[in-house]
Amino acid sequence: MFALRPHASSLAVLAMCVSLSPVADAQTPTPQRTPVLVELFTSEGCSSCPPADALLGKLAAQPIDGADIIVLGEHVDYWDGEGWHDRFSSPQFTQRQKEYGQRLNIDSIYTPQMVVDGTDQFVGNDASHAQTSIQHARQTPKLHLVLSRPTVAGRRVSSSLSSASPIPSDKIRGDLYVALVDPTDTTEVRGGENGGRTLHHAGVVRTLQRVGSLKDLSTGNLSFNLSAPANANLFQMRLVAFVQQSGPGAVLGAVATNITP
């Protein structure tokens, strides 16, 4: 078990000095762009987190040539006893962060924490590190994943995932994950460290589910269903799928699509 450290290090003060200017539409990836998965572990109860949430929003606007940046905002629950309950928080995301902590040899988990492609972690509002890490990650070859157009029935989203590229035999232990994501959300916080502030979030993960293994994908299309939260607006959400070495380890491929009527 790692101790929970509520504040990021003092390096976060310098993070927003690097400007990331959007140069492409997040909805129109091109074949030349390599998918890069960027996860942010954050909380509405953490006063250091709003700048990291803002950075995640800038990354979602695709500011880095050659990278199709897919963002996931995962709200942890260990801040919920500090005067404000984050409506997006889940122990599932706290557990995922702990697993990264063990895998990446972190003394203690903290917020805000950003993880790029499952291999590089740093203070979540360090824009310079984020840019360097994403530029490095986009040079790593990835599986070409393909999502079928999602269909909606009630609160259930159905789709299928396939790979248009061969799956190396040494990567067969990978896991397949799918997520339902709000591209943006806004909360009026009435307590805790951010009490009285209006917080803006990007890529908020509402549902995250393991749906199989990479071995399953090697045999053809993998069909899956996801249930959306009752208060989610499905037709404003995105469906994200990614393959990750067990551990959790390196992200081997990722893809995202809008959910449309």
Image (tube, helix red, strand yellow):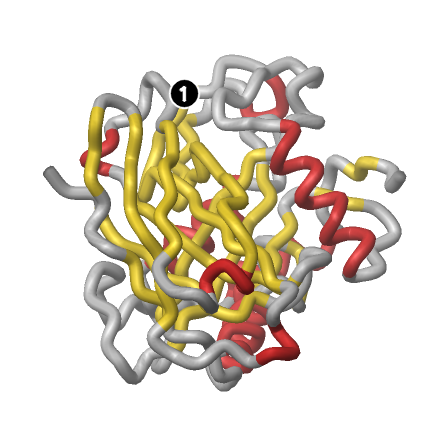
On screen, 121 above or below 238? below
Q: Quarter of the image containing the N terminus?
A: top right
Q: Is residue 142 left or right of residue 8?
A: left
Residue 128 appears at what percent x and percent y? 56, 70
Residue 103 appears at what percent x and percent y? 78, 58
Residue depicted at 21% across the width and 27% down the height: 153
Residue 232 appears at what percent x and percent y? 31, 25
Q: Quarter of the image containing the C terminus?
A: top left
On screen, 213 above or below 110? below
Instruction: Give 1 or 222, whichever is nearer the viewer.
Output: 222
Residue 237 appears at what percent x and percent y? 27, 39
Instruction: Give 158 or 197, whichever is nearer the viewer.
Output: 158
Instruction: Give 91 or 50, whichever is nearer the viewer.
Output: 91
What is the quadrant of residue 246 in the picture? bottom right
What is the quadrant of residue 195 in the picture? top right
On screen, 113 above or below 76? below
Residue depicted at 60% across the width and 44% down the height: 41
Specify few, some or many for label 1: CA neighbours under 10 Å numbering under 14, 14-19, or 20 or more.
few
Residue depicted at 44% across the width and 65% down the height: 219
Instruction: Give 27 or 209, whichever is nearer the viewer.
Output: 209
Q: Is residue 246 left or right of residue 179?
A: right
Which amino acid type is marked by label 1?
Glu
- The residue indicated by pointer 1 is 188
